[in-house]
Image: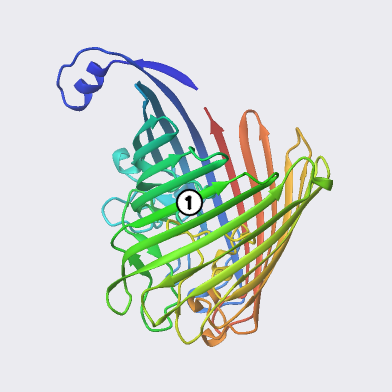
Amino acid sequence: MKKTLVSLAAVAALTTGAMAADKGIDIVTTGQAVVYYNTAAKSGGSGANKSQDLFGTSTTAGEMDNTRGNIGIQLNLDADLKNGFTFGSTINYLGTLGLEKNLVNSTMQNTNLATGAVHTNNNVGSTNVADDIYLAQLFVAKKMGNTTLKLGRQELPKSLSPFAFSEGWNVFKNTFDAALVVNTDIPDTTVVGAYVAGGNKNGFGANMSNFNNLAVNQHPVLGTGGLTVSGTAYMLTAQNKSIPMTTITATYYDMAKVVGLTRGKDGANVIWGDVLVAGKDMPLGLKVGVQGGQTSAEDSTVADTAAYGVKIGLAPIKALSLCLAYTSVDGDKNKANIAIQNIGGVKTPLYTQMVANQGFIRQDSDTYMIKAAYNTGDYGKIIAQYAGSDIGDGAQAAQMYLKNGKNEGKDFAEFDLVYKVKAANINWLAAYINQTWDDASGAYDTQDIVRFVARYNF
């Protein structure tokens, strides 16, 4: 972290050319540098889903890209503007430094300002550095007693906004154009209200400079595609810790003008709750969680989607933690089904979310997960987890790769092995992901993913 004295007159001169009185503010500078590499091997397919090998960079017509990489630099500028006002901004650079020339054929994230298209082997690099930079955050906050108001482009945490949150699995987090109000007047209670206008949706090959409408994933059983929120999303969350060792969180969303419903611009809403029991006095580090809720649309052709989950965690010794979780998501094969998923990314708020299984657990699916994590101390942390899903016909067929789009009774499984360590002041991550699902004609039935990430925080 570095503090820099910046003259307001200098800032004005740089941005507008105007002269102003020199009042000087302290700007705290932080950031990170990231190297990200992801490769996948697929087998059992043909045609467009032809089998591929790990570390391949094939660009043969009809084949899917399977190796992606990025070099990223993030710069955060934060300042205390006095009188209860604060300022924050984040500028991100996304590039490749020539990785596409011999190691990758696509990117994890990009800033294709012209079209928003995913970079290919022909345009993964940029000749103009300005095209590789985007403004991820820019906000002003004001604290008034026990209330904080935050206006502008910002991150939203999953713990308080489970269906519109910033995901940290990719090179950089996605952000939202929003107004956020946080109040703590009620004892042991945090109340959060948000007005979310849009964001840059996270995902493989995402155009992070494209801040647009929020997205609601839907099973296109009626011939329609995904839904978009052309209006805004309103959120209200209350989190209470009055009961010893217990955290209760309840959230409600109202999404206006959902384009794609029968009448064009009807709305949709989500109600979600989470209860976590944990504390130092619990035996063997016991933790118990229960979650559940429902998504609903103002359209009789779209089914209500209910979901619930339970998890139990143990820490029998200081270095070892164990977890067992189960989630269930309803589905209706005769109607469209809205997914239990982040409207600003691809992940779910479900307890059984793994590294890459979101497409198989978010709709009409029963999933169990087992997880073990061992912290060796200076030698890093090892995480091993396995999840199995029983998929129904109400699931999104495009994500299932199952025979003739019929998912009922089909199975999906994922095994993750993740190693995290901090060495030379750099946070390293190495992950192996294995996915298997029931065979489908013309589609692959297994996938192996290898991921390497290095982050240096400054």
Q: Nearer the viewer, residue 203 or 365?
A: 365
Tell me where residue 393 appears, x and y as whole percent.
55, 83
202 in relation to 86, above or below? below
Per the image, the residue denoted by label 1 is 237
Q: Is residue 348 visible?
A: no
- Residue ranking furthest to the front: 186
Q: Nearer the viewer, residue 182 or 225?
A: 182
- Residue ranking furthest to the left: 18
Counting other residues with Cα less than 10 Å from the Cα at mark 1, is it few (<14), some (14-19), or many (20 or more)?
many
> In which quarter of the view is residue 140 placed?
top left
Q: How is the image coloured?
A: rainbow
Q: Is residue 342 visible?
A: yes
* 37 horizontally vs 208: left or right: right
Q: Nearer the viewer, residue 8 or 248?
A: 248
- What is the secondary structure assignment of the residue under circle 1? strand
Residue at image x 41%, y 48%? 193
* 252 horizontally vs 188: left or right: left
Q: Could you tell me the amino acid type at mark 1?
A: Thr
Tell me where residue 185 appears, x and y as whole percent.
48, 37
Residue at image x 72%, y 50%? 383
392 in relation to 83, above or below? below
Residue at image x 34%, y 21%? 83
* 231 horizontally vs 374: left or right: left
